[in-house]
Amino acid sequence: MTKRVFSGAQPSGDMHLGNYLGAFRNWVRLQDDYECIYCVVDMHAITVWQDPAILVQQTREAAAAYIASGVDPKKSILFNQSRVPGHAELAWIFNCVARLGWLNRMTQFKDKAGKNRERVSTGLYVYPNLMAADILLYKATHVPVGEDQKQHLELTRDIAQKFNTDFGVELFPITEPIIMGEGARIMSLRDGTKKMSKSDPSDMSRLNLNDDTDTLAQKIRKAKTDGDLLPAKASLLEGRPEAQNLVGIYAALMDQSRDTVCAEFEGKGFGDFKKALTEVVVTKLAPITEEMKRLQADTAYIDSILKDGAARAQAIAAPILMDVKKAVGYLV
Ligand code: TYM
């Protein structure tokens, strides 16, 4: 079977360091060994309200972020989800395969809906079925994501298995998640127990890929920490979530282990550490920010990449979707 990667991010806000370290950077690393499909999931984005004019811009911005991070649109397929109707068609079939009890266990829905459960869109509830459709529409075998998506990928495996069993076919692969390294779980700069997220109301909680150098420096300076010094080993950071997070970010950006970072900064306070961290963050992100700006100024280029990518994605999806429709018993 073709080793095929599928992954995506929602254009529902500015892309941030968590997206880069948990996802984009790893997508780039997989391009040489897999056939890769990277999607801007605009259909997922509208599960919560998006201003239409802003959604268009953010879809382009997401594509620019992928490319600026190193996704090569010649090697990999890059497109926006709504352009390939098979995502919606397969999601409907999966709405009829997945069980209510499965969706009721999804922690991301519970977090996002919060106390507003009765007022969120029904799309938000069936979101994980659409995500399974994204992946299985291409029979993707591997899905690189941050740790927060793990439960959704388990559901994708359950859906694939149930579909195959119910219809007596060997159609869908059982997809493997790829969750890589120190960057898999980057936390908020304001609260080390919450993940860094586009939907956090405080912009100070995240480092955005389009932040300028001064903003990045200010956000790191103001990041919450404790008064203790850095210990000799990462295990001694236990119970200090903010300290753990900043050391984790440094480690991920430098491709080092947390232990190596602790050994280097042992006995130093967070004043010193934050200066070193700022330098690393700025060195790594500034070229990406710059490239994103350049790409976003050329909307015709971005639009042509996404359109061409959608045609290539459609060509892979069409025969798979036809097999699915036949398996289900649609008259085709
Ligand atoms: P989204 O848009 O929230 O995030 C995109 C990618 O970034 C990762 N990520 C993080 N990694 C580490 N630390 C963080 N704080 C952090 N925040 C986000 C996410 O794990 C993700 O890999 N449901 C998905 C989008 C999606 C998808 C798919 C992914 C739709 N269909 C099919 C894979 C395959 C989401 O909301 O990601």
Image (tube, rainbow, N blue to C red):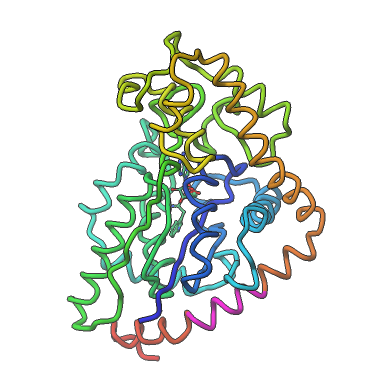
Q: Residue lying farthest front?
A: 264
Q: Nearer the viewer, residue 89 or 175?
A: 175
- How far from the left and from the top, in percent, is residue 94? 32, 67
Q: Residue lying farthest bottom?
A: 332
Q: Is residue 62 left or right of residue 173?
A: right
- Residue 314, magenta (yes or no): yes
Q: Quadrant of residue 60?
A: bottom right
Q: Magenta part mainly helix, strand or loop?
A: helix
Q: Give the magenta range.
A: 308-316
User: In the rendered image of this protein, does residue 2 appear above or below residue 213?
Assistant: below
Q: Nearer the viewer, residue 137 or 113?
A: 137
Q: Is residue 25 left or right of residue 289?
A: left
User: In the rendered image of this protein, does residue 230 appear above or below residue 256?
Assistant: above
Quarter of the N terminus within the rendering: bottom left
Q: Quadrant of residue 38?
A: bottom right
Residue drawn at the location 35% of the way across and 22% of the way down: 237
Residue drawn at the location 42% of the way across and 33% of the way down: 260
- How far from the left and from the top, in percent, is residue 278? 62, 27
